[in-house]
Image: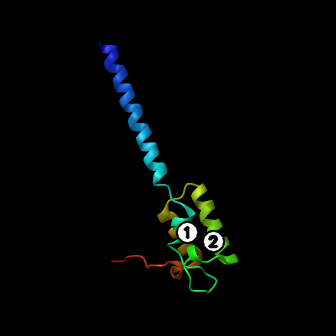
Amino acid sequence: RMRIKKTMLLWLVLTLLLAIRISEAAMALTVEDASKLFMCQCGCGMTLDSCYCDTANKMKSQIKQKISQGKTKDQIVADFIAIYGDQVLVMPLKAG
């Protein structure tokens, strides 16, 4: 009887851990999602996700690299602001 309870508890814990891992993967940041946050810096006035110039491709590569390093969306935004300034953002950060 005690062994059955332990087995059931173990299965419950494993199921919860698996559910957490699946939800993390589903919520993972993609280059496409992050590209929607930024303006291309070539001067075209387009968002990064809709521009395919060399500058846009370079910026998308930077995003891909940062995602592979495990950086969050907020960290990538902060990195891009540090590199390109506030004008890189599609929408300005909320202040105050």
> In this rendering, would 89 be left or right of 66?
left
Task: Indicate the quadrant where residue 68 lies.
Answer: bottom right
Percent across and percent down for residue 35 are: 55, 70
Instruction: Give the structural element (helix, strand or loop) at label 1.
Output: helix
Report the amino acid beneath label 2: Met
Q: How is the image coloured?
A: rainbow
Q: Which mark is residue 30?
A: none
Kindly identify which numbered label has been placed on residue 59.
Answer: 2
Q: Amino acid at mark 1?
A: Asp
Quarter that holds the N terminus: top left
Question: In this rendering, is residue 36 above or below 75?
Answer: below
Q: Residue at x 67, y 71 (%)?
A: 58
Q: Is residue 25 left or right of residue 56?
A: left
Q: CA distance from mark 2 to mark 1?
A: 11 Å
All told, the count of numbered labels is 2
Q: Position of residue 21 (x, y in %)?
A: 46, 43
- At 57% across and 76% down in the image, what residue appears? 50
- Residue 26 position, x and y percent, is 47, 52
Toward the left, the furthest residue is 1
Residue 10 vs 57, above or below: the answer is above
Residue 42 in which image quadrant = bottom right
Q: Nearer the viewer, residue 44 or 67?
A: 44
Residue of label 1: 79
Q: Count neighbours of disc 1 (C-alpha within 10 A) and say few if under 14, some if 14 to 19, many if 20 or more.
A: some
